[in-house]
Amino acid sequence: MLLGFDIVDVFTDRPFAGNQLAVVRGADELSTDQCLALAREFGYSETTFPSSTVIGGAEYSTRIFTPAGEIPFAGHPTLGTAWVLRSHGLLTTPRLIQVCGAGRIGVRFLEDADDLVELSAVPRDLSGPLDEDVASALLDDLGLSVSDLAGPVRVAGCGLSFVHVPVVRGAVERARVSTRPLAEYADRFAAEGVNLVHVRGDAPQLQVHARVFVPGLSVPEDAATGSAAAGLGVALVATGQLPDGGTYEISQGVEMGRPSALHGRVDVEDGVAALCHVGGRVEHIARGEIAVPAPAGPLS
């Protein structure tokens, strides 16, 4: 038996940039082990397995896997999966709902903006500022020093949480991939990765140069991270950089040779982030078929 798949690059307006995604179709009956085997075969930061059933052309469910296991939510898989399903005629409305481990995520196609696709996620986590000793240790892991710090370090997320570390100009480029697993910080904070950012501009429009590191996992650095971008909106409100909401344009993946552009905006109610939106474009790269892994059998 063979399953159809599509490969797309997300958060880019040209092929072979942005973040790669494999979308496997018709995989409703696959076990978790089989999905994981396929995710490892593709080897991308994420692979998705959307359901074959689409309700009213507007609602579908999907599972999201890294090569290390299943995760509840991620940004570029959300946008890329919606784009692929739409390209196959399964999604027929501009406003959609994706059901995943993090719940119901709003997705929409902005047809007046060259089919930019955008997700909307509710903030779920905000803590900090972290102590200076923790911030200093995180910076040291990345080959930087506390003198590179440009503001308070916070943990924030909208389904997946990241530790957002603002740094001075030039520090993002100088950072190196960390080899220290974030699990070693489990008694101080819980996060999926480190979002190292240099923020410039003034509210309500900011520009951000970012690198996202996931030390200790199968993807040590990510080319474009929509979930981190969503959480950054929460952090920018909390630090007073977007006190009344606004937009933030993120450049990521440059140092990896996969330049990416993420369009973020955040809505504010009563002084706190109420809804975070992250958008980008998608480029189709390949389409094909892949074999179904054999189910895991009993240990011999």
Image (cartoon, rainbow, N blue to C red):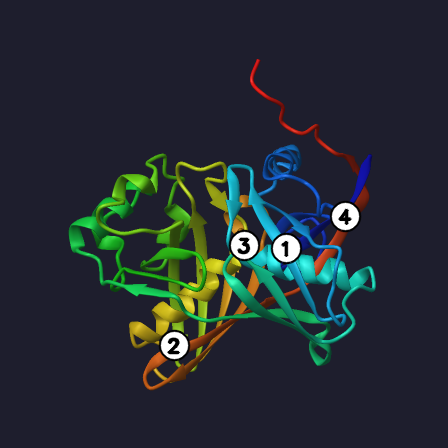
The nearer-to-camera label among 1 and 3 is 1
Secondary structure under badge 3? loop
Spatial CA distance of label 1 from label 3 is 20 Å
Spatial CA distance of label 4 from label 3 is 26 Å
Where's residue 33, x and y in %? 60, 34
42 relative to 286 in the view: left or right? left
The residue positioned 40% from the left and 82% from the top of the image is 268
Do the residues under discs 4 and 1 have CB atoms within 8 angstroms? no
Q: Mark 4 points at which residue?
A: 26
The residue positioned 79% from the left and 72% from the top of the image is 92
Q: Mark 1 points at which residue?
A: 62
In the image, 274 versus 149, the foreground residue is 274
Name the kind of residue labelled 2 in the image: Ala
Mark with earlier residue (4, 3): 4
From what the image shows, is residue 251 above or below residue 34?
A: below
Residue 273, label in figure: 2
148 relative to 124 in the view: left or right? left
Quick one: label 1, few (<14), some, or many (20+) residues within 10 Å? many
Mark with earlier residue (1, 3): 1
Name the kind of residue labelled 1 in the image: Thr
